[in-house]
Amino acid sequence: MLVTLATNETIGASASATYTYSPTSLQSVQVRLADADWELGNITVQLGSVTILNGASNWGLAGLTGLISNVKVDAGSDEAFINLNFGSHQCTDRDNLYVTVTAGASALSAVDVSAIVDEPGQLPLRITEYSDNTFVSPSNLMAISYDSAYQNVENDDYRCEIRTPVSSSSPSFVSASSYYRACAMHDDSALFGLLNKHGVALETSYNYSASAVTDRIITVEQMPSTQQSQQQSATNARIVESQRSV
């Protein structure tokens, strides 16, 4: 079910605005931003007290959107679209959804926030931006890389060591750029890289040089699903199916 959290809102320079909704479950959030410096801000998403998006930069999230939604990313544009896929989170304790949009050095002249809620699903996902050169991503499904200063990374020949319990490799960020291009089907590979896509969630460590042009990685991670949330998901699915059969 599509719901609206905000339409044509203005957020002042360096200010934040939080938009809320009370869903039974959450599947995704969509944010449209209008401003010449849209890439300078960031977005945080919480369900109750649980953070499922940790204040990641608009720029990195636009790169993730470009990969999963095949939307071209243009830093020179005065608007951007960001699509955040969270799998399916069951709100077992009547947790509210909070979407916080923070502007950069200039105001955001128009902000639209919507969400897909109360649909059936099983696996809750979390999106996390990392600025460390060495870190471990739990239950990792995929990761993209980029430069926080919006520089091209297609010729960044530093390597990133990637280790899981079953394999390890050290691809260059040049190769990550090519992988992004192969999966995104549009020519923004100069700005972003795709480091990995796992078929199942795996603890994954990343290690790369601080001298690389690339200095940010965003991961998509699978979150634990409790028995209560699984039962709630099954109940929601039955309700949806019964409504469709009417």
Image: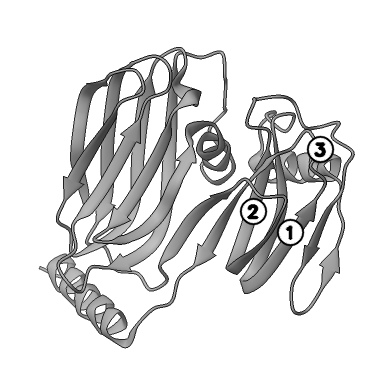
User: Closer to the N terminus: mark 2 or mark 3?
Assistant: 2
Q: Residue at x 22, y 68 (%)?
A: 91
**Does residue 138 lie above or below 98 as drawn?**
below
Q: Which residue is mark 2?
A: 143
Residue at image location 64% in from the left, 70% down from the top: 199
Q: In this rendering, would 173 be left or right of 70?
A: right
The image shows residue 31 at horizontal and vertical percentages of 35, 35
Local packing at callout 3 (Cα closer than 10 Å; few below 14, some 14-19, many 20+) is: some
| Residue 129 locus on image (x, y percent) | 55, 48
The image shows residue 11 at horizontal and vertical percentages of: 27, 22
Mark 2 vs mark 3: in front? 3
**Label 2 crowd bin: few (<14), some (14–19), many (20+), radius 10 Å:** many
Please provide percent x and percent y for residue 231: 26, 84
Q: Which residue is mark 3?
A: 212
Give yes or no for contact between labels 2 and 3 (Cβ–Cβ under 8 Å): no
Query: Which residue shows up at 68% across the image and 37% down it?
Result: 146
Q: Which residue is mark 1?
A: 206
Task: State yes or no: discs 3 and 1 in contact (Cβ < 8 Å).
Answer: no
In front here: 157 or 86?
157
Badge 1 density bin: few <14, some 14–19, many ≥20, Cα 10 Å? some
What distance separates the C-alpha of mark 2 from that of mark 1?
A: 10 Å
Q: Which of these two is toward me, 12 or 21?
A: 12
Residue type (three-letter) at the residue carrying disc 1: Tyr
Answer with the quarter of the image where residue 223 lies.
bottom left
User: Would residue 192 appear left or right of 113 to someone viewing this image?
Assistant: right
Q: Amino acid at mark 2?
A: Ala
| Numbered disc 2: secondary structure | strand
- Check contact, mark 2 vs mark 1: CB within 8 A: yes
Decide: is 214 above or below 124.
Answer: above
Residue 211: quadrant of the picture: top right
